[in-house]
Amino acid sequence: MKRFPSLPVISCIAFILAVSVASCSSDNTSPDRPPVVDADGDGGQPSDGPILCQTDDQCPDGQTCQSGVCVDAGQCECNYDCQKGQICNRATHRCEQGAAANCVDDCDCYSGETCVQGKCRQSGGDEIPCQGDGDCPSGQTCQNEKCVPTNCTTREDCAGATCLVCDNGQCVAPPPVCQGVDDCCVGYYCNFGTCVPESTDECLSDNDCTDPDFPRCVDGKCIQECVNDIDCPNPGEVCQDNHCITPGCQPENCPQGQWCDTGDGQCKPGCDENADCTPPETCNYVTHQCGQTDCCGGCPSTHYCDTLTCQCVEKCSSNLDCPTGYECKPDGTCWCTTGSCPPNTHCNTSTGQCEQDTASCTGPGDCPTGWTCNTMTGQCEPPSGLGQEGDFCLQDSQCDQNAGLLCDSSIFCIGCAFNDPNFNPTFTCRYECSCLLGGCQGAGQQCLYRHLGLKCLCVEPTP
């Protein structure tokens, strides 16, 4: 007799079948998982087409979203489909260990990067890091390791109220020493390392340059005739006031009974020193005539005549106007006092001047701090090259020559005063600052010494 399963067994089989059917008809979704995009519209039936996606969550298990489609995990099209430290093998479409180097396009870079001039750079923001202009896109230059927009290509792009030049695509201040015209702002040209003015006139030859201040034609521009002696084409010429001239006489080259007119460079009849005159007459250094006058030739009321040097010296009003070791007397003259003069000197009370000793030291202990004893001369010597205006000195090298200071006969570092507004502001003294050496550049000028020769000024002579 045939037996049938009991009811409990049948119920169990039915439950298993129901669960199986429900599982097979599942659409592979869950409340936490976005629906898979039906790429071919066939209701989810199997096909060979790719599944479109925007994120990994839209892909089946074991797949990731790359370039808008679901692919098996590990597959790639570009480096940005891989994690940092991996690169995409274009042949196998698999991410492999490695690091992205140079790039041809963005596909060679990681996510969030852009290919710029063969290098992968971080995308976004206004600044791209760089080591040189080659790291920056077109229209930008590398400044301070950042790519910035180019704002000039020539110096004309930087023309304006401020003197600027174009350097590496940026308008900047010109360098201290120029190598060419591009190192100078518009309106200037480079002359042996110095930017000097040029005329706005254009030219083909010197004949086209009618402005006497810009008589030479160079590179199509009218320029000054000279800035330095080397600019002058003829042998023996020197550059004076931007013009090439043949130097004239020197005081020591004129014959006895003549003086050197530095205005036109000619030796002319007259006296140049007291020795040219018959005592008791002296030489008037303004008129260059012998007569009964002090050797200074007459000084302004603000000055007195130093008969030792035959120079007009500015009167003092207090001890502050006098060099170290000197006092201001009621007559406006600076006189030394016993024991007040600098090292190696003593006060000559008959002349009021500090005079150099014959010997003052035998070793370092005899000199002030920082000074050295020259045992050959027996003199204490100050540090070389540090002497400032009014400091004691024995030779030029002990003065700050970079500041235009020299050691004069009064054993002090001196320098020229430029365009003192209290006097004639037009003329200045020459470097040697000495009337006896031709001092003033302007014809008929008188050189006035200030405070024992610490400074000199060129002024109109007193009538």
Image: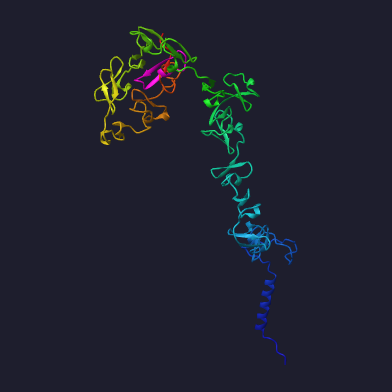
Residue 322 image position (x, y, % from top left): 32, 22
**Depth check: 213 or 145 in front?**
213
* Residue 120 spot, x, y in % from top left: 61, 51
Which residue is depicted at the point 32% across and 32% down? 381
Q: Residue 418 appears at what percent x and percent y?
A: 43, 22
Q: Is residue 296 visible?
A: no
The image quadrant of residue 232 is top right
Closer to the camera in the image, 165 or 192: 192
The N terminus, quarter of image: bottom right
Nearer the observer, 124 or 325: 325
- Let me know if residue 185 appears in the view: yes
The residue most toward the front is 255
Whether residue 349 sits left or right of residue 246 in the image: it is left
Whether the magenta-drawn stretch holds residue 34 is answered as no
Residue placed furthest toward the top: 292
Viewer-nearest residue: 434 or 281: 281
| 10 vs 340: above or below | below
How many badges with numbers are in the image? 0
Query: In the rendering, at what x and y percent does residue 138 appear?
Result: 64, 43
* Farthest left residue in view: 338
Colour scheme in use: rainbow
Looking at the image, residue 335 sits to the left or right of residue 262; the answer is left
Task: Find the magenta span and give its range.
Answer: 436-456
Say which quarter of the image contains residue 234.
top right
Quarter of the picture containing the C terminus is top left
Q: Given the current orientation, which residue lies at the most extreme bottom position?
A: 1
Instruction: Identify the residue at horizontal 42%, vertical 30% (top origin).
Output: 402
